[in-house]
């Protein structure tokens, strides 16, 4: 780890000014940044501690939306009564992320900014080839061990999976990220690798995430997050789905449905083909299962991750059917 200077910012403006300096990185809960610095992936020249900025941890659920401050802890948001009641998929995604200790430390802004868990990315000493870490150096994963890698949104430059849970629910419900003056859809905030694998987020030097905003809707109120993984705790998703459902007054016709996928794509992935196939249809198991097969349209595997192409449609179908059982 190289030497760095440390600055404690006491306002968003101070954080923005400091973050604009070359090599500066923000520190919130530290649960990702410290790991990345230890393994030699992050080499900040200055660490700007934003964890003491007052007011940035507020959670406000009113006027038909939720605004969650960037410094709100994952555990606080997961356990917030109105988030649980009006955005259950958001609460469930957070509860199923990481561990209790991490959730108590980690912030919402830091969660959105977490980097991929591709093992080659996190091991620069043994795997110098990684386009995400060192643009133009190649990709050690392609032709390597790919069990955890993505099947959607990949490119010849990078096949790393987006690892987080919260962002999957945010993308399903059209949430926005606040970056001071600039606001953008969470879906657009995350970038597929294309030829520029090193850019995972649409964030500019000097920008600080101040909040996320989630519009309320009937589909968000009747929603769930299903995460399938190798073990039931402290594990990233093999495949996951955030799903929201709104039925017509007849209780059978699908008025609105939202579906986003985790664990299978290079960024949080909205499954619009499945949504379009179900909107206006009668809710029954056969229809749901048939539409869910569209989940993996355009998927490309790299051998050991082929199972995701079979797994993800089942996860989507299971999540939708579970919602259908709720009143
Ligand atoms: P930090 O480590 O402080 O910062 C992370 C990054 O975000 C840094 O680059 C920092 O500069 C930047 N940053 C922080 N705040 C801001 C801001 N306001 N504006 C702009 N940039 C900012 N996550 C899941 O979703 N699901 C899991 O299953 C899961 N499992 C995990 C298991 C382990 C063992 C670990 C270590 C992590 C796991 N995580 C998981 C990731 C965890 O959720 C993140 O580490 C955490 O959310 C990061 O938040 P933080 O506040 O600690 O961020
Ligand atoms: Fe690096 Fe992406 Fe290849 Fe992993 S998949 S080694 S992150 S370029």
Image: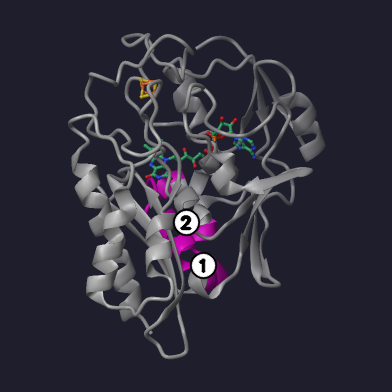
Image quadrant of residue 260? bottom left
208 and 162: which is toward the camera: 162
Q: Residue at x 40, y 56 (%)?
A: 273
The residue pinned by badge 2 equals 169
Return the mark for residue 87: 1
Q: Any magenta on residue 135?
A: no
**Ligand 1 under 8 Å from disc 2 Cβ:** no
* Position of 69 relative to 162 (above/below): below
Per the rendered image, the range of residues in magenta is 75-102
Q: Is residue 63 left or right of residue 122?
A: right
* Position of 194 relative to 254 (above/below): above
Q: Is residue 267 left or right of residue 302?
A: right
Image quadrant of residue 282? bottom left
Q: Residue at x 62, y 14 (%)?
A: 4
46 and 140: which is toward the camera: 140
Q: Position of residue 58 (x, y in %)?
A: 68, 57
- The total of numbered circles placed on residues is 2
Q: Position of residue 203 (x, y in %)?
A: 65, 33
> Mark 1 or mark 2, which has the lower sequence index?
1
* Position of 3 relative to 17 (above/below): above
Image quadrant of residue 40? top left
Question: Main SS type for the magenta part?
Answer: helix
The residue positioned farthest toward the bottom in the image shown: 250
């Amino acid at each position: 780890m190289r030497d760095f200077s440390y600055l404690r910012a006491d306002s968003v403006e101070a954080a923005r000014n400091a973050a604009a300096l070359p090599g500066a990185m923000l520190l919130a809960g530290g649960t990702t940044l410290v790991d990345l610095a230890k393994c030699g992936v992050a080499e900040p020249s200055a660490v700007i501690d934003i964890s003491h900025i007052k007011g940035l941890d507020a959670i406000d659920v009113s006027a038909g939306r939720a605004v969650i401050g960037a410094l709100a802890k994952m555990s606080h948001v997961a356990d917030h009564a109105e988030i649980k009641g009006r955005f259950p998929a958001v609460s469930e995604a957070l509860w199923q992320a990481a561990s209790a200790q991490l959730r108590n430390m980690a912030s919402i802004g830091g969660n959105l900014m977490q980097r991929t868990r591709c093992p080659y990315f996190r091991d620069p000493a043994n795997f110098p080839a990684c386009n995400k870490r060192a643009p133009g150096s190649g990709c050690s994963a392609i032709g390597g061990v790919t069990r955890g890698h993505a099947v959607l949104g990949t490119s010849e430059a990078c096949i790393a999976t987006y690892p987080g849970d919260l962002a999957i629910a945010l993308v399903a419900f059209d949430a926005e990220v606040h970056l001071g003056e600039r606001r953008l859809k969470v879906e657009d905030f995350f970038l597929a690798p294309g030829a520029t694998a090193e850019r995972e987020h649409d964030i500019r030097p000097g920008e600080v995430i101040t909040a996320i905003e989630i519009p309320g809707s009937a589909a968000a109120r009747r929603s769930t997050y299903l995460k399938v993984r190798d073990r039931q705790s402290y594990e990233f998703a093999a495949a996951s789905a955030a799903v929201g459902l709104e039925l017509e007054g007849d209780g059978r016709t699908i008025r609105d449905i939202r579906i986003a996928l985790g664990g299978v794509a290079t960024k949080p992935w909205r499954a619009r083909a499945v949504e379009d196939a179900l909107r206006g249809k009668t809710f029954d198991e056969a229809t749901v299962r048939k539409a869910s097969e569209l989940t993996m349209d355009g998927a490309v595997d790299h051998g050991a991750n082929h199972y995701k192409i079979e797994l993800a449609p089942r996860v989507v179908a299971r999540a939708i059917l579970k919602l259908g059982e709720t009143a």
